[in-house]
Structure formats: C-alpha cells, structure tokens
Image: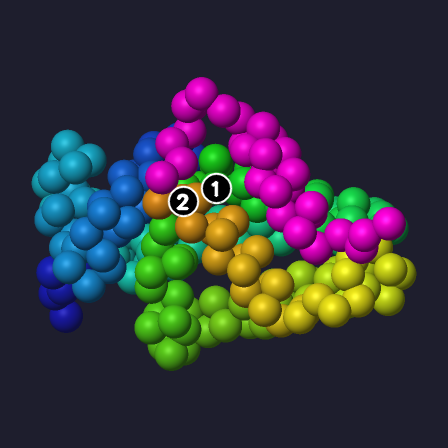
Amino acid sequence: MPTNKKPQVTATPERRRELLDTAAEVFAEQGYNATTVRKIADEAGMLAGSLYYHFDSKESMLEEILRTFLDELWNGYDAVLDAGLGPRETLEALVTESFREIDRHRAAVAIYQKESRQLAAQQRFAFLAASQRNFEKAWLSTLERGVVAEVFRADLDIRLTYRFVRDTVWVAASWYRPGGQHSPEEIARQYLSMVLDGISARE
C-alpha cells in the first residue's frame, strides 16, 4: 500500500543537535502548542517536509530535548549525591550543577519551567513527573540533613526553603545567556552567598 510518510534518515550528530537546538529556542520563545513544524523548519533554514526526514513529529523533538537535558542534569546530580559530601557542600554543589545546566540547556530549562506540568499528563512525557519527584527528594533530604546536623537553622521550614531555592535558581533561565559576563560557577557563588547566610545556623 503506498504511503506519504517520508522515510527517516540519520543526520550526523552535529546536525541533529543543531536542529534540536533550533527547535528548543522556538519552543521556549513561542510555547509548545503555538509552535509548528513549519516554524522550526523556517528557523533552521529548511523546508518543513525536509524536517520530517529527521524527526517524525514536533513531539519527538520536544521529548528528545527534554530527555537530553534531564539525563545530563541527573548525571551531575547523581555525582554530587554519591560523593559523600556534607549537607552544606551538597547544597552548594547542587546549585552549581543547576546553573551549569542552565548554561548548557537554557532553552530546555525554559520549556521545562513553562510546559512540564501540562506535558506530564501525557503518557509520552510521564518521565517529567518522575524526574520532578526525584528532584524534590534530593533537595528536601539535603536540607533535612543540614537541619539535623545543625548546619542549617533548626526553625527552617524545609519545604518552603526548597520551593524558594528551586524557583529562584531555575528562573535564571529567563534572563541568563550563555557566554555572558559571568560564568555559571560565578553566578552560583553569588547566589549561594546570599542564600546560605539566610539558612545557615547562627553561631
């Protein structure tokens, strides 16, 4: 039976990465629902039909963008969590790794911030909810360890602190631009100098 579906071809890793980077920027700027394959193709300098030779849908592009970001994020987080650091050092390392990921995947972070709640309701994107649960567990356990060890204040509201740290770190994706005046490590140091003064146990 004849079919109009174009055969999938394998792009070079570099070209595939370029196309996904372009798609991520368009998704981040326009929103997932408002983005069309034609718009992505226009930004990539190709015909919409040609894009289907590399990806079968905009959903598959978005899934690969978000999975790549989260896989790299968790590689970094797992290294931190397995390092046997104290709670303060763990918090510092998690914040630094978060800013590094914003530097590497700014558009993907912006998409995640805006779209993850709606997307997670779809079976294809169920991994987003699982990642969020693991994310919350990692940060809450670090804060709890700090309170128990008397490194962080005894009166600290753990969940409120987690939400504050989470939102103030990841909102940086809305203004941070790679290659700017400050490196992700420098931004993390500035951020931590403000936050840790507020949550550390007083002498």
Q: Residue at x 36, y 51 (%)?
A: 110
195 in magenta: yes
Question: Residue 102 got which mark?
Answer: 1
Asked if residue 173 is positioned above or below residue 35 in the image, the reply reads above
Q: Which residue was labeled with disc 2?
A: 173
Is residue 152 left or right of 189 when viewed as pictured?
Answer: right
The reply to whether residue 126 is visible in this rendering is: yes
Q: From mark 1 to mark 2, how far is it between C-alphas?
A: 6 Å
Circle 1: element type: helix
Residue type beneath disc 1: Ile
Residue placed at 42% from the left, 29% from the top? 178
Front position in the image: 162 or 84 = 162
Q: Position of residue 56 (x, y in %)?
A: 26, 57
Amino acid at pointer 2: Ala
Of callouts 1 and 2, which one flags the residue occurring earlier in the amino acid sequence?
1
- Determine whether 186 is above or below 196 in the image: above
Going 38% across and 32% down the picture, which residue do you hit?
A: 177
**x%, y% of residue 46?**
14, 36
Q: Residue at left 14%, top 70%?
A: 1
Q: Position of residue 192 (x, y in %)?
A: 64, 42
Q: Percent from the top left, x then y, of residue 186?
A: 58, 28
Q: Which quarter of the picture shows residue 22?
A: top left
